Image (cartoon, helix red, strand yellow):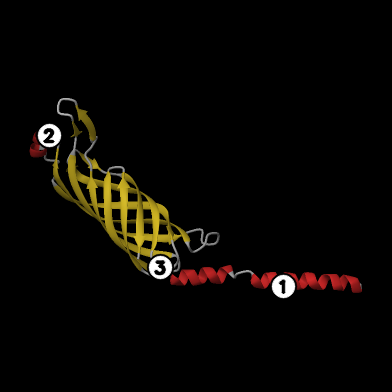
Amino acid sequence: MKYLVQLLIPILVTTSAIAQSEPDYESVYRSGEEKIKSQWGMNVQISSVGFVIGGMYNYKVAPKTFLTSSLDMFWVRGKDEQQTYDYYTGQIITINSETILMLPLQVLVKRRILTDVLSSSMRPFISGGAGAVAAWYLDGDAPKSFLRDSIDHKASQLTWTATVGFGADFGKPGSTGYGVDFRYQVLGFPHYLGLRKRFDNFQIGFHMNF
């Protein structure tokens, strides 16, 4: 029995020392979460129908939850737009081009997920929201007769939009961070804007919070 006790004492002491040296992951996570505050940000998105750049403000309403307001400039390319080589002039020409500018103003809820298995320096999230869009048809290859005579074409319009997506933020909590996100946007107009009414699209982009 004496030898058994002598054998167990070093094992217990070593185990206790290891346990004390292990970091308290719960307190580390809680500390990191507390450092993540409301932040300004900017984003750049490549869309299946154009290009988006804009600014946003992330307001922290609860742990792991943000209310995000964003205002973007959305340049939309023409329906079936494509480029081809002109063998007679030696230049690249664009067919079916349109110049359409949209200004989406949205409010989204952004919620962190997988917080129990991933660190605060990698913060996956899901998001969803809606807003209003002002849009202008500026120029393009749409038939002049269609633009002039169609009662269903409006060069400037207002409509609504809805967006859902997911992504991840990276960086040390409380400092300038960056991330990527993937979105699907529902976007349609009551009248033709150029050659179409529907502009539903997928987006992949980069954002920075500071």
Q: Which mark is residue 88?
A: none
Residue at (60% x, 69% y) in the render: 23
Residue 178: image quadrant is bottom left
**Which residue is the site of mark 3?**
175
Dot 2, crowdedness within 10 Å: few (<14), some or many (≥20)?
A: few
Q: Element under label 1? A: helix
Amino acid tagged 3: Ser
The reply, left or right, for residue 46 in relation to residue 194 is: right
Image: 120 above or below 192: below
Residue at (50% x, 72% y) in the render: 31
**Which residue is the site of mark 2?**
143
Q: Give me the C-alpha separation between circle 2 and circle 1.
A: 80 Å
Q: Give me the C-alpha separation between circle 1 and circle 3.
A: 35 Å
Amino acid tagged 2: Pro
> Where does the image place residue 112, in percent across and percent down from the top left?
45, 61
Q: Element under label 2? A: loop
Which callout, 2 or 1, points at the residue further toward the start of the chain?
1
Q: Element under label 3? A: loop
The reply, left or right, for residue 210 in relation to residue 147 is: right
Image: 153 above or below 178: above
Q: Nearer the viewer, mark 2 or mark 1?
A: 1
Q: Which mark is residue 16?
A: 1
